[in-house]
């Protein structure tokens, strides 16, 4: 029987991007299916207060990125934080990406906030500091696509950092066999990130936009990270 993965979507794509890319959840479906997943998917829209009523509805859950910050006083953010704490107490496996990585850290006793380093955009490489037990033979570093201003600034208790660089020292962490989190976006394609950066160009600044777009030709480890996600899900 295939495992069930709950995709907790923490944002909705702008209409002009949704026409081609649908949603964050669908981007993850494409990523994981291309890596050989045999999963059943269930979608939950966190911004509309749609969260699993029963934690055993799925075998694992993945919390997506968002333009929101974990510190913003939205009712859905508060509800998601409460749900994460319940899920973690019940040892339900959680994957967090970008905002998901940040909100899990915040919910479990760490801290995420706007970074004074500015925008992290485009393809960036992070060192593999330590690797979780389900990550076999990792390289010394991995490249992923990034789009963020917020960062995890302090890890939750018992968390182990696994990715980091000078710009984003806590770019990934895990907690036992229950949490696997990362700041980078393995689900993004170069086409999607290009459109997203151009859409935000006025807020980002011309120099940062130029550097980010120039980086998109670089290969990324998205397929490898997808396989690590599947290994994490299959462990339970």
Image (cartoon, helix red, strand yellow):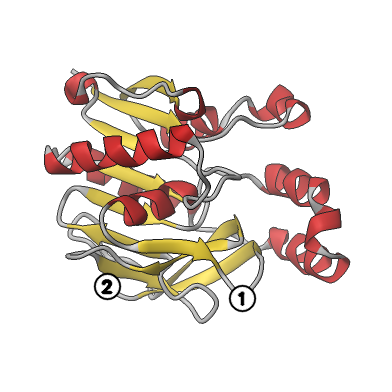
Question: Comparing marks 2 and 1, which lies closer to the viewer?
Answer: 1
Question: Relative to the observer, which residue lies in front, 57 or 82?
Answer: 82
Q: Residues within 10 Å of mark 2 (few under 14, many from 20)?
A: some
Determine whether 59 is above or below 136 in the image.
Answer: above
Q: Tell me the distance, in whole angstroms, between the alpha carbons under discs 2 and 1.
A: 24 Å
Residue 86 is situated, as x and y percent measured from the top left of the image, at 20, 37
Q: Residues within 10 Å of mark 1 (few under 14, many from 20)?
A: few
Q: Is residue 34 visible?
A: no
Q: Is residue 121 visible?
A: yes
Name which of mark 2 and mark 1 comes first in the sequence.
1
In the rendered view, does 178 fall on the left or right side of 180?
left
Which quarter of the figure is the N terminus placed in?
top left
In the rendered view, does 156 fall on the left or right side of 183?
left
Tell me what residue is drawn at x 52 percent, y 27 percent: 26
What secondary structure is found at the residue carrying circle 2? loop
Which quarter of the figure is the C terminus placed in?
top left
Q: Which mark is residue 236?
A: none
Tell me what residue is drawn at x 44 percent, y 76 percent: 169
Tell me what residue is drawn at x 19 percent, y 47 percent: 178
Residue 172 is situated, as x and y percent measured from the top left of the image, at 38, 63
Determine whether 32 is above or below 155 in the image.
Answer: above
Tell me what residue is drawn at x 21 percent, y 20 percent: 54
Question: Relative to the observer, which residue lies in front, 145 or 147?
Answer: 147
- Find out whether the residues at labels 2 and 1 contact each other: C-beta distance under 8 Å: no
- The residue that mark 2 highlights is 130
Instruction: Say which quarter of the image contains residue 106.
Output: bottom left
- The residue that mark 1 highlights is 117
């Amino acid at each position: 029987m295939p495992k069930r993965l709950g995709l907790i979507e923490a944002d909705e794509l702008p209409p002009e991007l949704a026409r081609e890319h649908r949603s964050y959840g669908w981007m993850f479906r494409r990523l994981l299916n291309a890596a050989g997943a045999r999963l059943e998917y269930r979608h939950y829209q966190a911004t509309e207060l749609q969260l699993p009523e029963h934690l055993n509805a799925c075998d694992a859950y993945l919390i997506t990125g968002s333009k929101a910050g974990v510190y913003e006083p939205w009712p859905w953010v508060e509800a998601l934080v409460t749900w994460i704490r319940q899920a973690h107490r019940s040892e339900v496996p959680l994957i967090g990406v970008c905002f998901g990585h940040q909100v899990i850290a915040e919910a479990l006793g760490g801290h995420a906030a706007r970074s004074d380093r500015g925008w992290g955009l485009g393809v960036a490489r992070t060192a593999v500091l330590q690797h979780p037990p389900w990550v076999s033979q990792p390289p010394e570093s991995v490249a992923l696509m990034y789009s963020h201003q917020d960062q995890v600034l302090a890890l939750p208790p018992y968390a182990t950092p696994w990715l980091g660089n000078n710009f984003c020292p806590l770019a990934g962490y895990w907690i036992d066999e229950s949490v696997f989190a990362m700041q980078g976006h393995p689900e993004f394609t170069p086409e999607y990130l290009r459109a997203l950066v151009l859409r935000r160009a006025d807020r980002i600044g011309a120099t940062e936009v130029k550097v980010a777009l120039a980086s998109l030709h670089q290969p990324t480890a998205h397929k490898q990270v997808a396989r690590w996600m599947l290994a994490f899900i299959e462990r339970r």
